[in-house]
Image: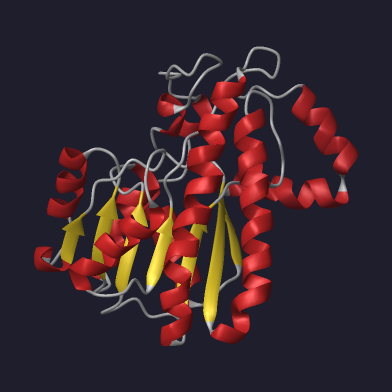
Amino acid sequence: MTDISGKVVWITGASSGIGEAMAIDASRRGARLVLSARRAPELERVRAACTNLSQVAVLPVDLTDFNADDVAARAAAFFGPVDVLVNNAGISQRSSVLQTSMDVYRRIFELDFFAPVALTKAVLPAMVERGGGHVVTISSVVGYVGTPQRSGYAAAKHAVQGFFDAARAELWRENVRFTTVCPGYIRTNVSMNAITADGQAHGQMDRGQLRGMDAGVCARKIWNAVAADRDEIAIGKEALIIWAKRFMPGAVAYGLKRAKVT
């Protein structure tokens, strides 16, 4: 069981959405928090919403241009070595395969795949040396089921699933736990911030996102899964498509070809 009370928890993408909600919930559970994202003012806003502010630090970082070992050392300088890393930072996509530039695909992979891998590798040695730790990575239902207009995002999340499955299989004897989270639609600005074929922001709230689960509810489910040392958790009614693809792949493929995805 992973009890985060008193533990050092480092959350990326903490300035909004699921990351913000996880930070606020973790502060209520007694964690010592390091919050990271690009926008320092937004991180300060989230910090102010937490409890016990002396146990909450802000570490702005651009995860598309950073040295992972250096950033991890800076994170550990606040309250000590990181006990729980939450890889939440990421970006979605709203553009077709035919129109999307390779620069956009590389940008998605840098943030959604290479950044969590680099940060994880940066904190793992200290976790192993101390006899344990926990890495939480926010993937997506799209990590199992590729949907239209999200080819790069789906590819990056599929890669995330594979990497952290392998890491879990390697490091369980070292008492390092890995929880992969596959949310469906959560009511955040992820579709607003998603990038289009030329790298510009989508700037629209998708219908599914607008009707999605409250981020606070999602955060509680994630922390409860971490407390139970769950290997993986799928969140939201959209998670049913993961099971449907396994047992009715033809039906899912038919539906995806006709899906309204924005």
In the rendered image, is residue 99 in sight?
A: yes
Q: Position of residue 112 (x, y in %)?
A: 52, 42
Q: Position of residue 66 (x, y in %)?
A: 37, 45
Total residue callouts? 0
Left or right, 53 with respect to 21, comes to left
Q: On the image, which quarter does residue 238 sit in?
A: top right
- Identified at 46% across, 74% down, the residue is 125
Q: Position of residue 16 (x, y in %)?
A: 31, 42
- Identified at 53% across, 55% down, the residue is 117
Instruction: Please say if 210 is above or below 182.
Output: above
Instruction: Please say if 14 is above or below 93.
Output: below
Q: Quadrant of the C terminus?
A: top right
In this view, the residue farthest toward the right is: 250
Instruction: Please say if 187 is above or below 55.
Output: above
Of 8 and 78, nearer the camera is 78
In the rendered image, is residue 22 in sight?
A: no
Left or right, 138 with respect to 24, comes to right
- Identified at 42% across, 45% down, the residue is 89
- Identified at 38% across, 39% down, the residue is 65
Q: Position of residue 113 (x, y in %)?
A: 55, 46
Instruction: Please say if 230 is above or below 139.
Output: below
Of 237 and 261, nearer the camera is 261
